[in-house]
Image (cartoon, helix red, strand yellow):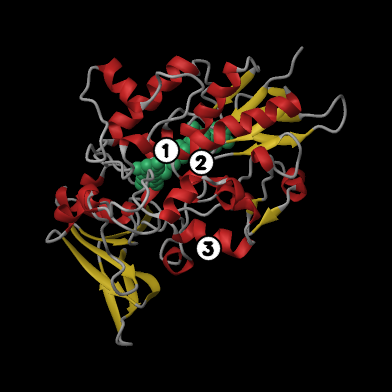
Amino acid sequence: MIQPVAVIGAGPFGLSTAAHLRARGIPVRVFGDPMVSWRDHMPAGMLLKSTPVASNIDAPQRGHDLVDYCDAAGTPRLVTDEDIIPVETFIAYGEWFQQKLVPEVERVRVVSVDRRTADGGGFELKLDSGELFTARAVVVATGLSGLAHLPPELAVAAPDGPTPTGPVSHSSQQHDLSRYSGKDLIVVGAGQSALETAVLAAEAGARVRVVARGQGSVAFGEPPWKQPRLRPESPFGRAWSLWALSYYPHPYRHLPAQLRHYLVRRVLGPLGAWWLRDRFEGNVRVSEVGRILRADTADGHPALSVLTHTGRTDRLSADHVIAATGYRVDLAAMDFLGHELRTELAVSRGTPKLGAGYVSSVPGLYFTGLPSAASYGPVMRFVCGTEFASPRLVRHLAAAHG
Ligand SMILES: Cc1cc2nc3c(=O)[nH]c(=O)nc-3n(C[C@H](O)[C@H](O)[C@H](O)COP(=O)(O)OP(=O)(O)OC[C@H]3O[C@@H](n4cnc5c(N)ncnc54)[C@H](O)[C@@H]3O)c2cc1C
């Protein structure tokens, strides 16, 4: 029997990769809950920061862009940079893409992946249904799952782990922010996720304060009509750097490691969307601080001790703290990859080192999406990264294991 390729993940990257594999006639099994990160781990009512042209899930054939979904669903077409995409529309688009191009997604978890050394190699996978099977190659497209980052100074106030009903949560645990109506809420962070979570909670009736590190760290981008015309257009705005990183990620993995990790963190870093400013100002208080020293709890209520820019220590208390402190790729946290497999992988600061075609140092094991950003650049953190990643990954896989 021909062994299939296993794609672990059914978010935009997993679905796109699987669609390309199917189009080449390569047998594939796809695991995961389609679009779950968007449905359960982002706030209801959220709007996408990416523009319609930067929000297409790449497919091997035409007719599967966001605008095609809008036409099929009979909803208003989202086309220009001024059209803003509600998260609910994007989830429906992803599910439509899945039903059309990857109908056989299996909604089970992969609990372990190990390398087979005998009988022709490949990988042995165990599913949470108890099934064991052999795959000739594995694509890891698990995205944000399990990679939520809670800084240690906040983690101390959540000894049993972050949770929306305790003193501290991570933004990935928040979906319905109306639970904080009438409460005092602190949101830590200055990225789009922090600023939009703060706005949505304030609009739901919470009294919200954003606590961000660095003077002037809470800022918003320029609207499309104010973007500089003489710079090239990219899915993220007009700038030479963004244009190069979006359309030419090829040489990225040859840059020095320090620079690669720095760019992944800083390019397209913390900045609110242009359309969020009006909803933010006047509704959300801001404390820009030198740094957060520690969090603690008194009577179950959290408080942050912060060092101000004048060198004073202040105490900010609330009913709940949401840490919108992002995600960190760390192979150690991807515990479904067998221990031996993880020790065999070449790693750079916790991220897999990838070669041409997104292959890791273990032949047949591929990574795409967020875990590939340290090798292929910050564009891999976004849906539009599927356009570069999926055809190249699948071409490599077909040549090596097809
Ligand atoms: C608040 C927020 C807003 C964002 N806004 C934007 C935006 O506007 N535009 C944009 O381009 N990007 C945005 N992003 C980034 C976006 O989340 C990623 O680009 C995208 O979701 C990555 O897709 P993915 O397929 O790699 O992973 P995910 O969408 O995270 O999907 C992961 C998949 O893996 C599956 N999975 C995980 N572990 C296992 C396992 N062990 N076994 C089986 N299946 C498993 C899950 O079930 C799921 O199907 C945003 C992120 C956040 C947090």
Quadrant including the N terminus: top right
Residue found 54% across the figure and 38% down from its top: 142
Q: Amino acid at mark 1?
A: Ser
Q: Is residue 242 left or right of residue 251?
A: left
Q: Is residue 210 among the parts visible in the rendering?
A: yes
Label 3 sits on residue = 262
Query: Is the residue marked 2 within 8 Å of ligand 1, measured from its CB?
Result: yes
Query: Is the residue marked 1 within 8 Å of ligand 1, measured from its CB?
Result: yes
Q: Is residue 298 among the parts visible in the rendering?
A: no
Sort mark 1 into few (<14), some (14-19) or many (20+) by Cα contacts within 10 Å: some
Quadrant hosting residue 129: top right
Label 2 sits on residue = 143
Residue 18 in the image: state x and y as whole percent.
Answer: 56, 24
Q: Secondary structure at mark 2?
A: loop
Q: Amino acid at mark 2?
A: Gly
Q: Nearer the viewer, residue 353 or 40?
A: 353
Q: Amino acid at mark 3?
A: Tyr
Query: Is the residue marked 3 within 8 Å of ligand 1, measured from its CB?
Result: no
Quadrant hosting residue 123: top right
